[in-house]
Amino acid sequence: MKKITNKLLIFISVFFSIILLSGCSSQMTKYNPKESVGKQINYTITGIEAGAGEMATTQKAMKAYGLDKGNWQLQTSSTAAMLSTLGKSIRYKQPIVITGWTPHWMFTKYKLKFLKDPKNIYGKTEDINTIVRKGLKKDKPEAYELLNRFHWRPEQMSSVMLRVNHGESPRKAAGDWIKQNQAQVNSWTKGIKHVHGQKLKLTYVAWDSEIASTNVVANALRSIGYKVTIQAMELQPMWTSIATKAADGTVSAWLPNTQGLYYNDFKGRFDDLGENLHGAKVGLAVPTYMKNVNSISDLK
């Protein structure tokens, strides 16, 4: 009953966030390059969940660029609500500033641009690393080797995310991608001995990007005989699961900024296999039709 109640509360929260943000969006007119962008969007940056790393970084950015001294505010909602509001704003050519990140299908589906960050508050590009529990190399060397080899590009991750956004299940979208990129997958599995039903557990944070990568690598591990289970968690429990050996690994570690705090907190209690994707980015983003807004400094 408690689980059902929690799920219902989450659903209600997301539903009303979408209604609230959509209502705000519908009241705005088309973007006017001759007027202050802040005034047009009620000095509001459309954000996501309060616990997300980019929300804390955005608060720092607002202070660094002096936005906190004006009327600017960061609106907490949910990823689903933010994406719904973004889609509606773009449909009607309305102004909007969001907390954005890539790889993500929104940058494939919509024409967006990151605002320049001359103070480098968000950092430059990030890597997404593969983290495994201590002892995995000895206990399950085949899984360790495949996870160590796993690497792909941002546009490949985005293509899987877009399939899921269009209605495919994550597992099917990952399977279809593997079929179409067999040569690359073979480079992850070549020469690795097949196992026979050994259990393996991967944990991940339930971001669209990590749903994509976790399902792809899980399918690759299944192809060499592992019985893989995957479990979505919040960030801290995900890192705890690896540090305590409750899970075998994750391919969801955004570093050095987004999850750097957890990396340092649990350092010495996991093995870092290095990046599985280079070129991830976090920052404030706007539609490209907002041509005179190119830097965070332009929001003043």
Image (tube, helix red, strand yellow):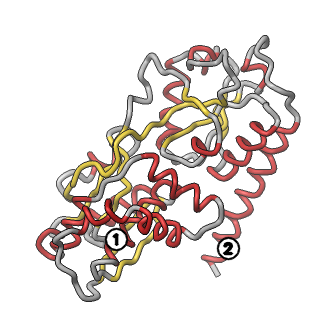
Q: Quadrant of residue 228?
A: bottom left
* Callout 1 secondary element: helix
Q: Residues within 10 Å of mark 1 (few under 14, many from 20)?
A: many
Q: Which residue is painted at 29% across and 56% down in the image?
A: 130
Q: Amino acid at mark 2?
A: Thr
Q: Could you say whether the residue bearing mark 2 is in a helix, strand or loop?
A: helix
- Residue 220: give its label: 1
Instruction: Say which of 5 and 28 sits in front.
Output: 28
Tell me the kind of residue under disc 1: Ala
Q: Which of the numbered marks, if any, corresponds to residue 5?
A: 2
Label 1 – label 2 distance at C-alpha: 36 Å
Relative horizontal placement of residue 119, taking residue 43 as reference (left or right): left
Sequence-first disc among 1 and 2: 2
Residue 169 x %, y %: 57, 70
Left or right: 119 as drawn, with respect to 264: right
Q: Is residue 82 left or right of residue 132?
A: right
Disc 1 + disc 2, Cβ < 8 Å: no
Nearer to us: label 1 or label 2:
1
